[in-house]
Image: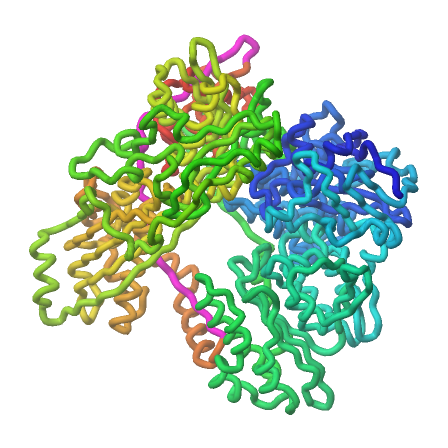
Amino acid sequence: PPSRRATMEFALNGEKVTVEAREASAMTLNEFIRTKTPFKGTKISCAQGGCGACTVALSYKDKEGNLKTKTLPSCLVPLVSVHRCSITTVEGLKKAACGSDGVGGHPVQERMVQFQGTQCGFCTPGMVMQMWGGLTQHKTNGGKDITCDSLEDLDLMAGNLCRCTGYRPISDCLKSFASDATGKVADNVLKGAIGSYDTKLNDPKFPSFLDEEDADASEECKGWARPKTMEALLAAWAPAKKVISGHTGWGVYKELCALRLTGKEDSVIQIDAVPELKQVTVTDSRMVIGTSTKLSDFAAKLGEVKGPTSSACTNIQKHVLLIAGYQVRNAGSVGGNLMMVKNEGFASDLATLLCAADGIATFLNASKKEQKMPLIDFLHAGKEEVLLLSISIKIDGEFVSYRSAIRPRNAYSLINAAMAYDSKDGVVSNLKIVYGAVGKAPIAAKALVEKMKGVNLYANRESGVAPNVRTLLIEVFEAMNDDHHKEYRTRVAQAFALRFAKCLSGSEAPEGIHGKGLRHTTTHQTFDLPKDSESKSLAPAFEPKVKTTALAQTTGDSRFTEDEVVPQLTLHAAYVQIPYANYTFAGLDTSLAKDALGSELFTVLEAKDLDKGMRIDWMSDPMLPPMPGREPPEGFANEYIFLPSGTKSLYGGQPVGVVLASTRQLALLAAKLVKLKDLKTAGKVYTDPSEAPVLSGVKPFNFTRGDKKKTEAAFQDTPAGKTVVSGKFEKKSQANFYLENQSSVAVPDEDGGLVLTMCCQDTNFIRKIVAKYLGISQANFIVNTRRLGGAFGGKYTRGLPPALVACIAARKVNRPISFVLPKEVDMAIGAGRQELKSTFSAVVDQKTGAIEALRANFDFAQGATMDAAEIHIMLMGQNLDMVYKLDQVDLVFNIKQTHDGPSTAVRAPGHFEAVMFIETVMDTIAGHLGLSPERIREVNFHPHRKLLATQGIGGGILPPALVEGNTLIPLWNKLVKDSKFVERKKKIDEFNSKNALRKRGIAIAPAKYGMLRFGNHAARMDVLADGSLQLVTNGVEMGQGIHTKIAQVALGTLNKKLGVDIPLELVRFANQNTHVIALGAGTGGATTSEQTC
């Protein structure tokens, strides 16, 4: 038997690291880096491999001695799987270029600064590592051996999300390394270097100790085996053992986690080191893919195929490169993807492609006998104790595939389809059409194939398919999952069938729809520099400057809440949640959690452990003054901190308790092991706002303008030449999806006080409420915030519940508590933007479309609790007339409690809904009257300059205001002219008249954002003895550059007064701290920077 290793070893940023085997098999690479090393640049956000914040680079030498580098999602990679590899983090990249104590960064890091490619900075280390790793993986010699177009084709950054939406400068930064970058990328503020960099001077070196040969046939670390030969694999494998390759399936199905968190000797076999299982061989007509072949290697091999079979391989490759992101394709295997389909019903693109390509699966059955089977049958056989060895596919002939997803790439398919066929002398043969992501496994569209096969290649199949398409897809529809996407999938499936028919009829090339859109490799941003002497005298104010923290963000030096060093004896918290809405439970059973964790589980707190009646009172605690006539029911106005047993749950995922354990991973594990006793349904679940009952004790909001009786009369007795136009408006929810999850660290302080470090948009708001509930003075409670990894409104109120829990727990157990929410929990307790449904009617002029009167009724789905719903309704109801003149208005808003998570502010709350609603009204009027939407908008605009435009519909706490000098009309006219809107629309109309299935469109719409002053803002500056300056403000840095703006203004004022030129580098911003600036407003509304300045 193979010897067991007591330890595993690898290199981290050039240094040798040795880890005890049991510890290594119980954690991910990301967890080790973040908790066992000083390196905090590698982040954790989605923990599913989808966001790229955790990206690191792995380097190793193949059996020929060639150095290979690829990027990986460290959140999914088991630590034991990087044995004898070299791992580089964002800090290691800086170290390689600048040395341990060097100033500056690697050329990729400095170039990102140069192109202003950072905002909040949370995603930036992952962006940097993917950029460098991608350039290195494709052997571009620092960019010297690749062009801008080739870099765009690689789509290197598709696996990295930037919620701040700063993709343009990031893309420009990457392309700036290309050999032909000059003139093809945007101008940048620093006017720095463009072109490739010297890899020999700047890139990390492969550690010499890893060059030593490792002769062991198997790497077995106390139950975790990683065989290196087929013989060792066959000896180790048994049907009961868990088999993994890249372990990326854990990102989709948490139960697939192979980490042995509690130290149990579960047998795990990682098969990615067996050479035979990583081979891809090609013959004239087929390709055999080893089960452990990485998706990226499979795509690369497809691209190498030349000759008659290259057409099919090229089209398959295009589709494979849309699966997940680069990091996951580098880690995930072909076989792992297929086994997730077989065992879990995964919505796979790959399975559809390979089934259509006449896939044949070779596998070992439970008796270790080799079998072969058509791949589609293998997948439909369901869960079996088998070991998949390889897949053979047909690669000659033609191949075309389609997919539909919420994003073109790095997103699961909602539906996909593929077609393969041969054609000889114009006759179609060997036709296969397969649909995927519609059921538990891909479905062969046999009836559709029978209709289209065997006739002349250019025969008109569309006429035969179109009238009968639903019947021809009967197998697909019968297998389709019955979920909220079913209607959409049904329509798209039919569209795919018609596209296949067009393809076989010769009216469309067999290339599929994998377009990446138009290239925009050249952009130019213009901004005005100060010309008057007064502005110039206030330099560096009014000058374009790089953000003060930009380099720290690109090198991983910037710290966020979760990066703070926690004190000794810190316990980690995790919510116990009820899984379903409108369910009850009879208590918590913690026995399984205690058995699994033993002494590592400290305690479990639930509702009965809290002071009686402790809830968050949204009617009196937030920002609005008390309003008469509003007395919502219990649970809605007063949010449960923990749902008590016997009480109906308000939403799936509602917290019922919290686990405290020694590590974050163990706390999360324990929370899943806590069972809810007697869990049962308690009635109907309402998620549709129009169906949910009206809340008792809550009067509707009514916003009006003009005489209400006249408004009603306009609808009752419509004058001649006028008509009533009615319509509907619906808006679904939208998640905040900041990359830094809600994070809090609560530390007991002297005199019974607390120090809370958290990510929030308003420290004073948090201090007032938490101090009140804990029964301590505000003076004895300190709240710290350094910076936020994105917020978008979601860290104003929804960070309060977990922060309060952390503080309660810290006082209960008298130990520091770290509470970081996983992404799925974060999104459950803060559901994002409110869903909205409305019906409306407008009295309009039949000839012009001018609105005489407008009335509407809104159902506003707030979710489980009140939060700040009233503010959002007021912002919407009072701002429908931002750009349009509305003289007679009557709006009614009903707050609906639905069985969804609590809704909250999301980017321009209320304003966004107001814009969407009123533009829907304009489009509806245009459609009813047969006039152009642009004309309807222009007719209803506020008048230009000469008249005061009354803005703000009455009925809320925000008074209507007079806006002088409205400039919308000339701005509109300029945009219409500069965009050549009229000419382009004419061409589009001509195109649409000639194409039955493919359509184009163009639209133009106005929007104006109402500036909202949140309250008083303050800043404090201390000039220290050495000439450096310390600044503190109650405005929170979350990517908008508030620190840089304040520093510019402060130094501009000082420079003018003192007659000196103080550099920005001398300014240091301290944490926002309620003991330094005790009072002040929160950060939001896009105005905090200017107000604080």
Front-most of residues 382 and 739: 382
Residue 461 point in image, percent of width and height: 56, 87
- The image quadrant where one finds the C terminus is top left
Tell me if I can see residue 686 in this picture.
no
Q: Residue at x 79, y 30 (%)?
A: 18
Front-most of residues 965 and 888: 888
The magenta-colored residue range is 998-1027
Front-most of residues 1020 and 639: 639
Depicted 489 relative to depicted 323: above or below: below
Residue 383 point in image, percent of width and height: 65, 60
Tell me if I can see residue 790 in this picture.
yes
Q: Residue at x 51, y 68 (%)?
A: 480
Residue 490 point in image, percent of width and height: 48, 71
Depicted 197 relative to depicted 881: above or below: above
User: On the rendered structure, is 254 left or right of 32?
Assistant: left
Q: Main secondary structure of the magenta part?
A: loop
User: On the rendered structure, is 434 left or right of 1015?
Assistant: right
